[in-house]
Structures are given as C-alpha cells and as structure tokens.
Image: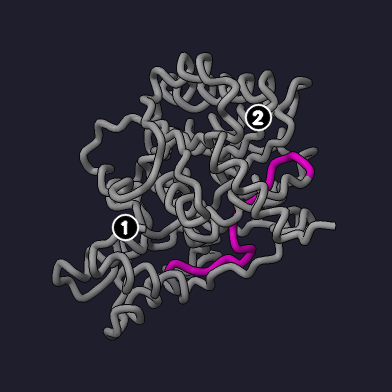
Amino acid sequence: MLNLFLWQDILNLMLQTSDCIVVTGAAGFIGSALVALLNQQGYDNLILVDDFSAVAKQGNLAGKGFAEQVHRDVFDSWLGEHAAEVKAIFHLGARTDTTLMDKEVFDRLNLEYSKNIWRYCASNNIPLVYASSAATYGDGAQGYDDDQSKISQLVPLNPYGWSKQEFDIWALAQEEQPPFWAGLKFFNVYGPNEYHKGRMASVVFHAFNTLQQGQKAIKLFRSHRPDFEDGGQMRDFIYVKDVIKVCYWLMQQQPQSGIFNLGTGKARTFADLARSVFAALDVAAQIEYIDTPLDIRDKYQYFTEANMSKLQQAGYGEPFYSLEQGVREYVQEYLIPGKYY
C-alpha cells in the first residue's frame, strides 16, 4: 500500500503536469495570497481571472508563477473552450465594498457571475471552493453558526452581504452540484497584499499607516451602545495565511460539501488589535475614539465570532495565528518593508 504522503506527491505531480487550476479575483487580496501559496506547493499551472487594469493591484502578482491571465469579462467564453483542462476552481473574485448600495452591481458581479461558475463546475465535474462572507450574519441576532438549516434565516445589513446570502441559499437549493464544493464565510481577514483596498482595507493596515505618518495615536470608533465600551467592539480577526491554508486544504481533502465558517473562533476587541500594532512597532499604545460615521452606524456589527466546529469536524486541525502573532508578522515582515506575500 502506497504511503499516504507518497500518494499525495503523485497526485500533486499529476495536477502540475497536465491540468490547470483557476483562481478568480487573483489580483486581489485573498486571491493573490492563494496564488502565492499554490506556487509554494509547486503549482504554476494557474489560470488567473480578474480585471487586471488596476495599477494598484499589480504588485500583488509580481514574481508569481501562472500559465495565463483571463479578464473576468471573457472568462465565461474561456471556460467554454477549456473544459477538459480545468481541474479545480477557487472562486474568490467579488465586489466587496460593504458601503456600496447599488444592488445591481452586486447582482451582476457577485450573484449571477457565481451562478455561472457553479453551473460550469457542476456540468464539467470540477470541484469548487468559493468565497461567501460573515457579512451574511448581519447584526448577529441569529448567531454565527454555519448550520445550513439556519442559513435562510439570516438578515444581512447591506447589499454586499445580501449578494453572498442569496448565492449561498441558491447553491444549497441546487440539485446539480459540483463533485465537491465549499462556500467559506470569511470573517475579518487581514494581512499582506491589501495595499490596494483603500477604505476597505483592514484596521491593521490603516492603523499602521496612521502611525507611519507621524501621528501618535490610533483612532477607533466610539461605541454607540451601552453594552460595549469604546474600543470594546469585537471581531473574529483571521490572518490571510490561515484563510488560504483552509482553502487549499479543502480542495486537497474534499470532505463533505457544504458551507463553512472561516474565522479563528475567538473574538477579540479592536482595542486589542490596536495594542497589537503598537507592540509590533515597539512603541507605547495611545488610542483615541471618534464617532462611527453616520453612513455605516446603523449597519455596524458590534460582535462577530465564528463557530468553527463544522470545519474541525470535517478534519481541519491546524492551529490559527493568534491576533498578536498575525499582526506582528504582518507589520514587521510586510508593512514595514512594503513587501507582498
């Protein structure tokens, strides 16, 4: 009987030499990090899908190995010509602006685009890992449990969250499915390759830049609820390297298909995060509080924490970076030298 690791090496070699892997959203934050991990695992037979016109994203793919870049607008026709070559799709491309209120944009780029990829995978027997979002949980009134029987009860707070929610519900209702599929509800992801994200970049990124510009204090949103202290608002912050490890593991192991939470399972305060940035820079912590902007105040989540038991029961047992570990590595190895992953 072949050693398990030898068999995995043989499987990897087969994929590397004859088949291609598709990554959508490949020039973006999580997509480009996944490309880096796939390269590290020996895969350069990658088809990268995105709108590659954004100059701010070009550094994300510099030095990475791939076979071809395909613009997202012609990806559908490309698939029609290369059905026999594609052996896996990581669908991470999406419009992710939680402040954008134009539902038509999300319907087109998130919902309908994802449906087309699902149908292609189902028809051509191709495994699919796709990005959902913890934004589907809304204000958290229904909890943060990825039990699929409860997903239809969730009420997101913005059109972005609704686009992810509607696709999750649609996927669960499909009789024709890919041979394996996993939808991942990403919680608050931070880490290298988010230089281009502007307002939507992580608090770690913005806090670091604030201090680098000569300011002494990190500004956090003041609490507008009596049950949370200023800076006591909590999120499940997850380092991007943990996110892509789970994506890769799911495609390799292919446990039972379904929708999975992807956080650390441990909520931390924004004050904890700010203090971690100061510690990574070895400077004394100074935190100031400002009012939450009115345009997001009624849609602001005060607490998120992923129930991670489902992924653990599927067999994933790798430890996650702690907030302190992830922030330190991100700040010292990427932000200070201005490097990409």
Q: Is residue 31 left or right of residue 62?
A: right
- Rate crowding at label 2 as few (under 14), some (14 to 19) or many (20 or more) other CA atoms within 10 Å: many
**Which one is in front, 169 or 336?**
336
Magenta stretch bounds: 256-270
Which residue is drawn at the image coordinates 70% and 26% (left, top)?
125
Q: Quadrant of the N terminus?
A: bottom right
The stretch drawn in magenta includes residue 316: no
Sequence-first disc among 2 and 1:
2
What is the distance, in whole Å, between disc 2 and disc 1 at their CAs?
A: 30 Å
Residue type at the position of mark 1: Tyr
**Which one is in front, 98 or 315?**
315
- Residue 220 appears at what percent x and percent y? 35, 64
Which residue is drawn at the image coordinates 72% and 45% (left, top)?
254
- Residue 328 appears at what percent x and percent y? 39, 75
- Residue 36 appears at what percent x and percent y? 43, 52
- Residue 156 appears at what percent x and percent y? 57, 38
The residue singled out by tag 1 in the image is 340
The residue singled out by tag 2 in the image is 126
Q: Is residue 286 left or right of residue 46?
A: left
- Rate crowding at label 1 as few (under 14), some (14 to 19) or many (20 or more) other CA atoms within 10 Å: many
